[in-house]
Structures are given as structure tokens and as C-alpha cells.
Amino acid sequence: MPLTMEFDIKAGDFVLAGEASSKIKDTLKKLGVKPEILKKVAIVSYEAEMNIVIHSVGGVLKAIISKDKIEIIAEDRGPGIENIELAMMEGYSTAPEEIRNLGFGAGMGLPNMKKYSDYFEIESQKGSGTRVYMVVLNK
Amino acid sequence: MPFNLHSIMLDREKCRGCTNCIKKCPTEAIRVRNSKARIIDQRCIDCGECIRTCPYHAKYAVTNSLDDIQKYEYKVALPAPSFYAQFETDDINKLLQALLEIGFDDIFEVAKAAEIVTEFTKQFILQRRDKIPIISSACPAVVRLIQTKFPDLIDNILPLASPMELAAYLAKKKINKQKGIEINKIGAFFISPCAAKMTYVKLPLGFERSYVDGVIAIKDIYGLVRSKLRSIKDVKPLSISSGKGIGWAASGGESLALGIDEYVNVDGIHNVIKVLEEIENGRLNNIVYFEGLACSGGCVGGPLTIENPYVAKNRIKKWSSKLATSSQVLEETTNQIINSLGIKMEDLLFKKELEVNPVLELDSDIEEAMKKYERVNEILKILPGLDCGACGSPTCKTLAEDIVRGLANDTDCIFILRENIKELAKKMVELSNKIPPSLERDED
Ligand code: SF4
Ligand code: SF4
């Protein structure tokens, strides 16, 4: 039986931001997941969470932990990405000035998620929302 | 970690079971059971937080006594940089002289070793830009914290000997070379602000064995040194450290000595945890060096010091700037020492890999661990979520884990106990109201 964790992520809440991925990390440590795997999940789940906080109107972060893999799913309720190819480019960012000033939104979010996951899938539609599905293999 | 290797201990007589300490421990290593605190040895990282918190002074650190130096033919003191901050004096040489007068034959300043470590750290950084941030290994409590709570950051730890370890190595090498005394007849004793260093000596990090033979708490010799200080007349030039090495005593000093801009220095174990979390999330990727010190203010705030850490920090600052002008000359002596003793990067590099300390795992088998995790969550639902600590575990969650690990019962929670008693009382009333059944049997 896989273990599922689910968190509501509020948009624009930088105080709570990072808590969900922190909890996922803690759980993996309790489960004794290897350091290399932990490192990957830490980065992808944090970036996914921050993406919802920065770029969306809010959404859900989910982790499904099984023996051989960890799935991270980030689903938001909009506004969606106009040009996914562009968004996947390193350094490309649509984050507003005030968020960049906080040290976020450097345009590394999606590229990092792709880089540190073993499987990466993104679906988005302008006007509806974005869904990122990632797998980190536990081996 | 085996019991007898730990420095932090509990005085059962003094402990009142007040639960103050359990909340402050960064690795949830303390439980109160039967009104007495207990330290779970495998979890303790010797940060000294509980020593600082306990209102009854029931926690203490085991260190060597000054008598222990007598076991060695030639006794060398390795004063920590923070030692210089404990006394009001116009001359550091007097402080070192006082150490000779209390029974040591020689001195090797850890501050000087720190300067040498800085030189090699610079080299290391140039080679290893790919693994950043590089995390300082100078504070053993922080290294153990990472082994316990941040296993994914072990790779980032600077694999070089700490200034204390290097000081002992160099002192012995030098004395052996110059005086011809055999290494095993030389006793090297760290004059320490730090409890974690004591554990380090018995269970070194990155090495099989430490060159340090013992650790003497600053607080234990403070009075003696002070009384000697008053009578010192002729001052010999003993100190060869510059402000850079002495600066290591306070948080930020190590980073400053490196002379780089992209560093972060953090003091206080709970602050260190917060920043390590960020490093874990990949948030500090443009930072090259991370200096984390468990004690607030850095080693000047170590649990075995006497002087108020803020006053001490100020003294370190003064010494650092006063001796900064001489640093050009002293940098030469740093290089001279490196050359004359033939020190290479090899000598400083860890000989043993740092391992994960798996005490937080619920089970070594992941499927079992997952089942146990579910049970923890089930139990959590019936606990009140107040984290009151009355059960003796720091939080409801830790109690739930303790129950699953078989180390506690749900009735350790006073709220559950009260519920159970209420239930029981209700049943007793019900029972007492029951009319006894007739003893006569139906005959057919
Ligand atoms: S020294 Fe630190 S880790 Fe050890 S029991 Fe005390 S507070 Fe916990
Ligand atoms: S900050 Fe210094 S005194 Fe405190 S635990 Fe670390 S090394 Fe020891």
C-alpha cells in the first residue's frame, strides 16, 4: 500500500511556503529513504510547491510514496502556462519584480524539477491550470 | 553511539523531571520517564542545549580533569580561540604563560591551526566548486546533526580536519621533530569551550583515532588561570596566531578568514537547522561556504565557557582587529609552519567516510517503516495535539512514534489516561448498580 500525503497550497503565502515539502522530506527520513533519493525529492517537491505559491491562484501538492518510487504531483487551479517550451527554459521567468526581490522566481523551478526527477510530465492550458507529474525512482 | 562515549550526562539526583529540556533538544533525544530525564544516546549530538536549558543544572558534560595530564611525560595545551576571550588582559602571551604555569610544558594554539585549515579550505574550495555550498566541519555538533537529520547533506561537509585535530597533530609532529620526544609520550589536551569536542575525541569524525588525548573544560581551570594571571611578570612571546585564527571563536570568523563573499554564517543549533533545510531545498545554490555553529554566538557561547558570550565576542573582535595588522607577518609564519613541517592536503583530508546515523528511521525495511508510519498517524488522531510534554515525550508526534517503536504506551498521555479513568469510573458505577443475578438455577 503506497503512502499518500496531500497538502493545500495557498497562493502568495510566503510564510507557509515550503512547509508541505518539508513534511514530505521528514516522512522520507522516517522511512529511511537513501540520501541521494531524498536530495532529489527535496528539490523537486520544494520547487513544485513554490511554483504554486508564486505563479498560481492556489493548488494541491501530493506525494505518493511506494517502495520503489516516489511520485510528486502538483496541481494548480490556474492561470496556466501559455508557452510551456519557453517556461521550461533555464532563467525564463514570469515572476513579478517583488517576488524576484525575495529571491524567488529565478526561472529555475521547472528546469530543476525536470533535472532532478526520473520522469517529468507537464500539462497546462491557458485559463485553466497546470499539472506537473514527477517520479523519483527509489533504487 | 555507545553509552560511555557521550559527554553529556544527567545527574539523576538533581533532575526533577520538569520536562524543560525535552522541548529544546534538536534531535528529540530526551524523554522523561518515571520523573527523570533520560538521554537516548544514539540521538544525542552533544550540542549542549539541554545543559543551557535545565533550571536545576542536572545536565553536565564529562571532561578530563587537570590531573589527567600527569599521565604523559610531555604535556601540551591546545587552547581554543575562545579561551582568549574569557579573561580581561592586555596581552595574549600572558594567557598562554598561565597555561604553562598550571602544569603544561608546551602550547600549540588552535587559532594557528585554524589559520592553516583556512589555507587548505581555500584550496579545497577551488577544486570542488561542484559540491556547493561546502559545509564547515569545525563544529562536531553540527556534523552529527547532519548525520542524523540531514543525511542528504553529508556529501557537502568539508572533509578536512578541524583546527583542534590539526593542532594536536602538528603539536606532536613538531615536538617530536624538535625535541625528539616519542609521540605516545606526548599528551595533547584541548582547552575547551565545547562538550561536543569531548565526544569527538572518543569518537572522531572522519578519522579512526584522534591525536587529541583529552579535553579540559575552560570552566574547570578558569579560576586557576585567573589567579596565575595576576602574578605573571616577565612575558615571553608565545603567541603566533593572528586575528584571523582568533576570530574563529565567534560566529562568522571562519568565513571571514576565507576571504570570500559568497558565504553564510549561522549560530545557534535551531537556526542552523532552519538554514540546512533551505540548503536541502536547493535554495542556497549560489552560496559557496556555509559556516554553522551549534552555540549561539559561536564557540564563545560554548557550554563550558565562563564569560558572557556577548562580552567574549566583543573581546574576540578587539583581538582580531588588534592583531590584524600583524597578520602579514604571521601569514608568513603560517606558510613557514606548513613548509617546515611538510603539511599537505593529504594530512588534513578525512580518512573515514561520514556515515548516516539512522536513528530517525522507523524501520530499516521501507515497507515495514511505511506500515509503522501509518500507525503513527492513526495514533496521532487520538492524541490531543497539545504537545504539552506531560507524557515525557517532546511532542504528541514523538509520543506516537515512541508508542510504535514500543518505547511508550498511549496511557502515558494524561488526557488519554483521564478518558480511560472516566470510562472505568462509569463502568464501576454501572457495575455497582447491577442487581446480582439469582443464584438459583433453572431446573430444566
Ligand atoms: S546535548 Fe543536545 S542533542 Fe544531546 S540531549 Fe542535550 S539537547 Fe539533546
Ligand atoms: S559552536 Fe563551538 S563550542 Fe559550540 S558545539 Fe560547536 S564547536 Fe562546540
Image (cartoon, rainbow, N blue to C red):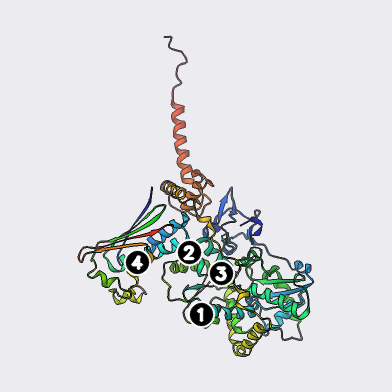
Q: Residue B126 carries which label?
A: 1
Q: Quadrant of ligand 2?
A: bottom right
Mark 3 residue type: Cys
Q: Which mark is residue A114?
A: 4
- Whether marks 4 and 3 lie on the same chain: no
Determine whether, in the image, residue A91 is placed left or right of residue B24: left
- Whether marks 4 and 1 lie on the same chain: no
Q: Is residue B57 above or below residue B411?
A: below
Residue at the image position 60 percent from the left and 56 percent from the top: B41
Give the CA separation, mark 3 to mark 2: 23 Å
Which mark lies nearer to you, 3 or 2?
A: 2
Instruction: Please state which of residues A66 and B429 is positioned toward the viewer in this rendering.
Output: A66
Mark 1 residue type: Leu
Picture quarter with the C terminus of chain B: top left
- Mark 1 near ligand 2 (CB under 8 Å)? no
Give the CA separation, mark 1 to mark 3: 29 Å
| Mark 4: few/some/many CA within 10 Å (<14, 14-19, 20+) | some
Mark 2 residue type: Asp
Would you name the residue on which mark 3 appears?
Answer: B295
Name the quadrant containing residue B334. Answer: bottom right
Would you name the residue on which mark 2 appears?
Answer: B152
